[in-house]
Amino acid sequence: MGASAQLVVPSKLGELEGPHAALAEVRAYFDGLVVDLLTPEGRAGCLLVNTAIEKSAEDDEAAAVVRGHHARLERTMTAALENAKRRGEVRAGVDPATAARVLVATSQGLMVVGKANPDEGVLRAIVDGAFANLA
């Protein structure tokens, strides 16, 4: 059985997937990650991150599942940042697609850091830093 058959990918990204999502929904996604990482269950895994780290290099099927989730997250964040830009919630010079790529990478890094150092102050500082460049 391939890794993707065993891989649970989040089926819902909450309000971030809504058509009117903007900066608040992107931030809420990150705030949810921080809250999850403050629990033993949350630290035990995002199975997606575990798979990305442990299996993607050697398992094409697992890598495809990870890429698919990252692409979905990037699409939803891009759409939300486009809405935010139209509303003036982010500065005019922000490219939503580029910012979404950075935020997806930040979300993955946040989960890795949170596994080793589930310190709320550290995690919130990482999130604050990611959003500082958008305003």
Image (tube, rainbow, N blue to C red):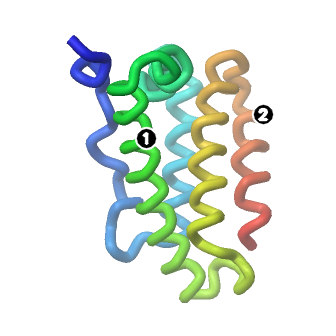
Q: Mark 1 points at which residue?
A: 67
Mark number, residue 116: none
Residue found 59% across the figure and 42% down from its top: 107
Q: The disc labelled 1 sits on which kind of residue?
A: Arg
List x then y, in percent, for residue 12. 30, 47
The N terminus: image quadrant: top left
Give the residue displayed 57% in from the left and 49% down from the top: 104
Q: Earlier in the sequence, mark 2 or mark 1?
A: 1
On the picture, is 41 further left or further right than 126?
Answer: left
Query: Of tags 2 and 1, which is closer to the observer?
Result: 1
Does residue 88 sit above or below 82 in this rendering?
below
Q: Nearer the viewer, residue 38 or 76?
A: 76
Q: Which of 6 and 133 is in front in this view?
A: 6
- Compared to residue 105, the image places residue 63 above or below, namely above
Residue that numbered label 2 is attached to: 122
Q: Quadrant of residue 111?
A: top right
Q: Position of residue 67 (x, y in %)?
A: 43, 41
Kindly check if marks 2 and 1 are in contact, taking CB atoms under 8 A apart as contact: no
- For mark 1, give the secondary structure: helix
Please identify the quarter of the rendering in which residue 134 is found: bottom right
Q: Compute the Cα span from label 2 to label 1.
A: 27 Å
Q: How many labels does the image show?
A: 2
Q: Quadrant of the C terminus?
A: bottom right
Residue visible at 55% across and 88% down in the picture:
86
Place of residue 47 in the rendered image (x, y in percent of width and height, measured from the top left): 42, 22
Residue 111 visible here: yes
Q: Which of these two is toward me, 6 or 21? A: 6
Crowding near the residue tagged with mark 1, few <14, some 14–19, many ≥20 C-alpha atoms within 10 Å: some
The answer, for residue 39, to whether it is visible in the render is no
**Does residue 16 appear left or right of residue 36 in this picture?**
left
Q: Is mark 2 on a helix, strand or loop?
A: helix
132 on left or right of 53:
right
